[in-house]
Amino acid sequence: MQFAIYLPPQMGSGTKVPVLYWLSGLTCTDENVMQKSGIQRIAAELGIAIVAPDTSPRGEDVADDAAYDLGQGAGFYVNATEMPWSKHYQMYDYVVNELPELIEASFPVSDKRAISGHSMGGLGALNIGMLNPERYSSISAFSPISNPVNSPWGQKAFTAYLGEDKANWLNYDPSELMKRATELVPAKVDQGESDNFLVEQLKPEALLAAAESNDYPLMYQLHEGYDHSYYFIASFIEEHLRFHAKHLSQ
């Protein structure tokens, strides 16, 4: 597995800095957020390291599909249970356990963590943050797939990776997890109103209903004129980093 990392200048003084893990969306790699978002500028100011894993395993021996929304570049941050995917597609365990262990053993970072992501990565960030409240101070997402069990993207991927039993899918559905969460990690979600995927694929209304039913501390903003692109992310990434910085400092 590949990952990208940004280390802020505060590390030069021997200070251990907190880490924001960023999960990217369909077809992306570990490079997208580092090249397109401008995240380094504000991370440098705030003293936060950024770690961005790839969106799936890669290689000739790794199962793949010709479609963009399944296989390499489309890991969905789940632990696959179905062959041929289960051999390599253990993205949930990689993000939660293997990657932080490697980062914390290799770089002068603290064990204070936050998690964020975009689209499929927003789904992953919400799921991982809510399922591991002891590991993350805060969660944020841009345009997340909020209700994958009712989304064509989610239904296709979950059938392939997790099998036909939809009860297993609920463990990776942010709206379901938000309804039943007991330890409430503060979350921030931003969504573009002109997003082409808003109605059919993203379904933020399910997440909002879940937050209301559980009195979950979710900050949600719908932005007029913004779509699903990195222009949207670049416009509001500073707000997300300042949100995380507040909670990482507590």
Image: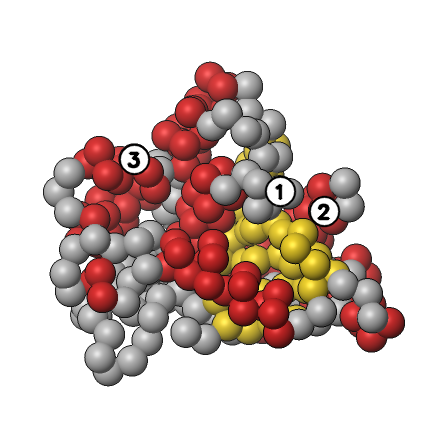
Label 2 belongs to which residue? 248
Label 3 SS: helix
Check the image and report above or below for 57 versus 154.
Answer: below
User: Which sits in the foreground, 98 or 115?
Assistant: 98
Note whether residue 242 is visible: no
Left or right relative to 170: residue 183: right
Label 3 crowd bin: few (<14), some (14–19), many (20+), radius 10 Å: some
Percent x, y for residue 21?
57, 58
The residues bearing labels 1 and 2 have C-alpha atoms spaced at a distance of 8 Å
Tell me the residue at 65%/55% (across/down): 111
Percent x, y for residue 23?
49, 58
Label 1 crowd bin: few (<14), some (14–19), many (20+), radius 10 Å: many
Task: Confirm or deny contact between disc 1 and disc 3 (CB under 8 A).
Answer: no
Mark 3 or 2 closer to N-term?
A: 3
Left or right relative to 235: residue 62: left
Label 1 belongs to which residue? 138
Tell me the residue at 46%/63% (across/down): 98
Label 3 belongs to which residue? 170
Label 2 SS: helix
Check the image and report above or below for 202 versus 68.
Answer: above
**Looking at the picture, which amino acid does disc 3 mark?**
Leu
Percent x, y for residue 66?
19, 70
Note whether residue 92 is visible: yes
User: Which sits in the foreground, 125 or 96?
Assistant: 96
Tell me the residue at 60%/27% (across/down): 217
Task: Confirm or deny contact between disc 3 and disc 2 (CB under 8 A).
Answer: no
User: Which sits in the foreground, 210 or 249?
Assistant: 249
Query: What colouring style does the render use?
Result: secondary structure
Mark 1 or 3 closer to N-term?
A: 1
Q: Quadrant of the N terminus?
A: bottom left
Check the image and report above or below for 94 versus 6.
Answer: above
User: Which sits in the foreground, 196 or 53?
Assistant: 53
